[in-house]
Amino acid sequence: VAVTEHLRPEHRAVLVVHNETSTGVRTDVRAVREAIDANRSGALLIVDTVSSLGSMDFRFDDWGVDVALTGSQKGLMLPPGLSFVCASPRAVEVGARGGSPRNFFDWRPILEDNAAGFFPYTPATLGLFGLREALDMLFEEGLDNVFARHHRLAEGVRAAVRAWGLAILCEEPDAYSDSLTAVVMPEGQDANAVIARARDRFDLALGVGLSKLRGSIFRIGHLGALNELEVLATLGGVEMALRECGYPVPAGAGVAAAEGRFVTQDQPAEAGLRR
Amino acid sequence: VAVTEHLRPEHRAVLVVHNETSTGVRTDVRAVREAIDANRSGALLIVDTVSSLGSMDFRFDDWGVDVALTGSQKGLMLPPGLSFVCASPRAVEVGARGGSPRNFFDWRPILEDNAAGFFPYTPATLGLFGLREALDMLFEEGLDNVFARHHRLAEGVRAAVRAWGLAILCEEPDAYSDSLTAVVMPEGQDANAVIARARDRFDLALGVGLSKLRGSIFRIGHLGALNELEVLATLGGVEMALRECGYPVPAGAGVAAAEGRFVTQDQPAEAGLRR
Amino acid sequence: VAVTEHLRPEHRAVLVVHNETSTGVRTDVRAVREAIDANRSGALLIVDTVSSLGSMDFRFDDWGVDVALTGSQKGLMLPPGLSFVCASPRAVEVGARGGSPRNFFDWRPILEDNAAGFFPYTPATLGLFGLREALDMLFEEGLDNVFARHHRLAEGVRAAVRAWGLAILCEEPDAYSDSLTAVVMPEGQDANAVIARARDRFDLALGVGLSKLRGSIFRIGHLGALNELEVLATLGGVEMALRECGYPVPAGAGVAAAEGRFVTQDQPAEAGLRR
Amino acid sequence: VAVTEHLRPEHRAVLVVHNETSTGVRTDVRAVREAIDANRSGALLIVDTVSSLGSMDFRFDDWGVDVALTGSQKGLMLPPGLSFVCASPRAVEVGARGGSPRNFFDWRPILEDNAAGFFPYTPATLGLFGLREALDMLFEEGLDNVFARHHRLAEGVRAAVRAWGLAILCEEPDAYSDSLTAVVMPEGQDANAVIARARDRFDLALGVGLSKLRGSIFRIGHLGALNELEVLATLGGVEMALRECGYPVPAGAGVAAAEGRFVTQDQPAEAGLRR
């Protein structure tokens, strides 16, 4: 991969975004680690897991990650306000030797105080209470079930996009994000008009395209606390906004396609209806 | 109407349910008043507005209602826990002359204390704080807009029921409820299986049929704090539950029908897409 | 006691208030039961535990109570909105034979539905969630500890009242309430002026005297979620209000007396200060 | 003052803490500004207002402050989680010319986005909703009244400390903090034992002495949402903890002294008691 080509001996870290929020593309973090190792590089592997952690599988130890970062407001289902950093022993050791000045973003006083059950600054306590509850919810459902749920919901969204005759920005099915789908509008059509219509008419928040994707895509988030019916509501809102903007999507096409992914048993159930 | 036939001179009150929660049938309260008056009866008109107030138009003074009752947990969008009674001067006067014993349900000590800004018992204060906010929300949207919204959402639900090939229990379109729709399953099919499936698979709460309707209908509530996308989610859940129970509803049929009621502008918008 | 004197064979129930909220007097419920039994009366023993349950010891089974009633807003530490009734098998049986008409206040449909995990009407669900948490809190502290805490706090309040040179309305120490103390103002002085001053100047809510006690007493509540410092704050507010109303209470006298009840160790502690 | 002595031409900023949280000493910010100006220095005046803003008067414009910083969790009465920075036009201009690298702590992208009603990162939205309410509360009471309230409460605390026979760490009455009082324990006595006792026995949180003051002082906070009775509760807890640790404070002495500051009318009120 690109890592192999570009990695130079003087590089000290490789920074990777696990799930690209602006495009809906997932990075194979393990493959990046293997590429680093294959290059006999000592570079640290630093991973942004902001829009993946808690919604998509991420394995800090197994994948040889050195530093992972995330926030409270996505897969952890909390209001924004907390950030998290997880560092490997090797990262801590490299950090201790590092020469650059640092202050608030220095993890050393935090690690030291944490060991005694304290925090060196005033922590955002409400967020910590919420975090305890959020983790209980995730572990009660079971992480494997959480990831399977997000995969199922994402499959529903992707089926809907295809039913609308639109393209998914991520061209590689292996790299599909299970927490976000970026949808490409046909050439010459304004994605931002769809986003504005969804917001004004149906109180539905879609993401805009960023920088050079501005106006050509819209983004559907499907991470965190979410179930099948909420996905159907979102898809219904998108297809109504598309229609109101003049894009010829057949009524209910996207919802119907997603339902096809969610209905697991399409024949007479024994406990069900007799016809 | 029935009132004219059955009203006898000795009758002291006519009790009417404005919106029948178990069947989804709306009563023409004004016509009941007119029938009482045409009979030269002095009967009080007492109206249960539990599942209509705040979602469907109800006019205490214009319609000559003497006593109206409701609860906090439906159109007023609050948790259950408060009940409300509204009495006309004539009802208060008749009540004062009434001979039956009463205690907790006597409105006289409440009226007396209320006049001085008090309440004779310990009131459920949290509910009152919530009520203030709920009324602000209703008045901010405007009651006419609230009623129009519920009519539009109800029309969407009814369109979906027809698209599923099922019948609406209320046979008289003029009497359709805008806060609840009872759906009749075909002969020999178990509505309760659909309800159980919707709950177990999609976390969706549908109402059961009561007494002799048990097993033959299910009920979809669409009152209170509700918008288009929540209705689509509900309809998606119902049609998936129907399919999982073996009823042959075409994928997305109900949602598509409802969207047809919610999309107001199905042509190229000037600010929208150019094709 | 009075029960022995007044009980007649035709009496079907004895109604007792466990803790008299208007006077701060505790009734010996077990003695009432013994008096009923000694009279060979079949009367049911019905007890109002509104301001005692959860703050003072109450033993439904041991004391032979037939029906007990309470509310959510006192010892159970919840907002007002729930009432509770507990009935003995004998009360249920007598109720089933009873001839008086009843409807909402009939416990039979509730008992029947409860057996299957349901409730015949729409329950105040938020209150039930709160109740679960409140009971967890009481049981975590331990009921004996809860009762000991309220006794200690009440002793502090009573010491303060004496330090102010005022009388406790309840003249019998054995009957002191541990959840409420009624304080008698000297002849000719207006208790309501003290109450108004406490409210207006210090945002402190004291209870007024009811009916013939109006103006001659004020009431200090000390039940539910309460600790030593909250009692000191209350007593400080009362003594400042008394002073502002011209009653010559020495500064801090009541608080000092209460502290004397709360400080358990008034000598150099081994882990404490060395002097 | 010290500023005049130490300020050198090469100094580019003077950093001042308005209210020293570790000592309870207030800095005369205006005098610092005047000293800077008198020195013909162009140094920016940067002020930490963390434990003063919203509890003590602070005048950004009048006092010629260039940058002020605060947090949500003190005078603004919110949970911890928001920080605030206020910069003068001159500070913004100097910052734009500054050569040091900066990223997250750069105010330029924030100022730019704010102008359009946005924020460049995900803001802690719940904190912002709370802030709106907190500011409403402060402005409803009136800032002058808020400051007067904190001064009155602080005078009560200081009177209590003197009544205990203990010293206030801040020796200069003009520099007393109205949001925090640091109390000096007599030589040889352990302030941390008092703090531990207050916490364990009375659930009262006192502040420890920091660095070289560790063990010799404890700190009483009296800022933010606070009234007279809460101060009395705090003082009651402190004096009980002192007694339990063997320090000979007369019962109620501190509370009595504070009450003397809070009672405004110690004579018979016309509407009060007649004796």
Image (tube, coloured by chain):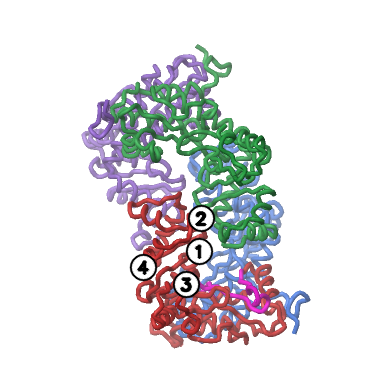
Chain colours: A green, B purple, C blue, D red
Q: Chain of mark 3?
A: D
Q: Which residue is mark 1?
A: D73
> Disc 1: which chain?
D
Name the residue at 65% across, 34% down.
A34
Q: CA distance from mark 1 to mark 3?
A: 11 Å
Q: Camera-side residue: C131 or B137?
A: B137
Q: Is residue C156 above or below residue A65?
A: below
- Residues under labels 1 and 4: Cα distance? 28 Å
Secondary structure at badge 1 equals loop
Which disc, if any, is residue C79?
2
Q: Which residues are magenta?
A: D205-231
Residue placed under numbered mark 3 in the picture: D52
As for residue D215 lying within the magenta part, the answer is: yes
| The disc label shown at residue D90, or none | 4
Labels 2 and 4 positioned on one and the same chain: no
In the picture as drawn, the residue positioned furthest to the right comes out as C270
Give the CA distance from mark 3 to mark 4. Answer: 23 Å
> Going 33% across and 40% down the picture, which residue do you hit?
B46
Mark 4 Cα shell of 10 Å, populated few (<14), some (14-19), many (≥20)? few
Q: What is the C-alpha distance between the residues marked 3 and 2?
A: 35 Å
Q: Quadrant of the N terminus of chain B?
A: top left
Callout 3 crowding tier (Cα within 10 Å): few <14, some 14–19, many ≥20: many
What amino acid is found at the position of numbered circle 3 in the picture? Answer: Ser
Q: Quadrant of residue A36?
A: top right
